[in-house]
Amino acid sequence: MGEQTQPHHHLPESSTTTQPPVIDTPSLPPTQNPTSSKLPFRPKKTRKLSAVTSSENPNDKSLESTTSTTSDAAAATSNKKSKIVVQKVIRVLPKITARALSCKGEVELALRHLSSVDSNLDRLIKLHKPPVFDSFQPPFLALSKSILYQQLAYKAGTSIYTRFVSLCGGESLVLPEAVLSFTPNQLRQIGISARKSSYLHDLANKYRNGILSDSSIVNMDDKSLFTMLTMVKGIGPWSVHMFMIFSLHRPDVLPVGDVGIRKGVQLLYGLDELPRPSQMENLCEKWRPYRSVASWYMWRFAEAQGASATAAAIVPVDESATPLQQLHQEQQPSFPQQQPSFPQQQIIDPATNIANHG
């Protein structure tokens, strides 16, 4: 029993010579811990090996540069392709800037454009002579004339307009000051109704107050002009559209509410019903920027289809007459009275530059 307890008394001596005391173990640095000594060196060793590998292998840099060059080239190629695509779109859809239809050669440009974008309209263009837009009247005179012809037959309107011009002393003297100098009673004596007298005075007052002028009307864009003119009493959207086409010769006007143009569009595209004004913009979008010329052909097409069976073609006209007189001669026999849904007067008016709502 004494031998079994003796090693227990000498255990501290052997532990001090061969191994540090257990109590000193927590004070050892982490690098001397056999279980954790390998962990801190693994990332360093990995980084060192990767660095050595990249330095010892001369192809790594060339590979990296080749990869970067390839990626840059691919990016440049993709950018170049995207630029080429944008350029192609610009070439395919060029922006056409249309001038006034009275400018030399502009009607020919309009016909080429319309023929290229609409095969149906191309066949119609080949059947009729091209329109002519060469007449010009000062805006105040043209607007006054449109007011006087409203809701009148052509002959009656011409008679009243002639007396009105004579009262002013000639067409060159149809000015805002002259109109304002006439009382409603004086205007009534030459056949102008009290309502139309108020329309003429309202137009003249807007000129006198500087809201409108001939120069501002000529230089105004289509949208602004439409807004300003529809502020005048007695001048509605249809009257403005007719004024813009036949007086100012604006190239891209589409009278969406005109029955003749809507009828022409229905016939041109074989529609079951007369297109609504809200549908006209989409149906005629391809005609931009020459919708005024296309509208002129819609009138021609509608009147030809509405003519009686014995007058299948448009009747000959007097070549010595002015273009607007020729159009009136063409249109007068076109629509018989038995077609109330397509009134005759509204087709005559555009050709005679008269804002008549019939």
Image (cartoon, rainbow, N blue to C red):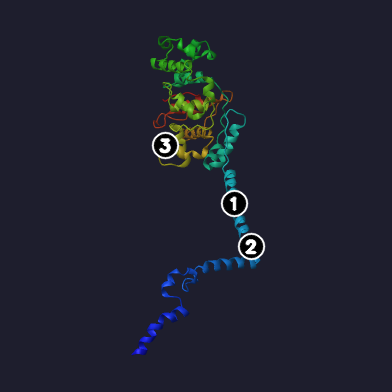
Q: Is residue 79 placed above or below 188 in the rendered structure?
A: below
Residue count near mark 2 (Cα–Cα under 10 Å), binned few <14, some 14–19, many ≥20: few
Q: Position of residue 86 (x, y in %)?
A: 57, 46
- Residue at 60%, 57% in the rendered image: 71
Q: Secondary structure at mark 2?
A: helix
Residue 81 is labelled as 1
- Residue at 37%, 83% in the rendered image: 8
- Report the mark closest to the observer, 2 or 1: 2
Q: Position of residue 298 (x, y in %)?
A: 49, 34
Residue 278 is labelled as 3
- In the picture of the structure, the residue carrying the numbered disc 2 is 61
Residue count near mark 1 (Cα–Cα under 10 Å), binned few <14, some 14–19, many ≥20: few
Q: Identify the image quadrant of residue 182.
A: top left
Quarter of the picture holding the C terminus:
top left
| Sequence-first disc among 2 and 1 | 2
Q: Closer to the camera, 264 or 313?
A: 264
Q: Secondary structure at mark 1?
A: helix
Alpha carbon separation for disc pair 3 and 1: 40 Å
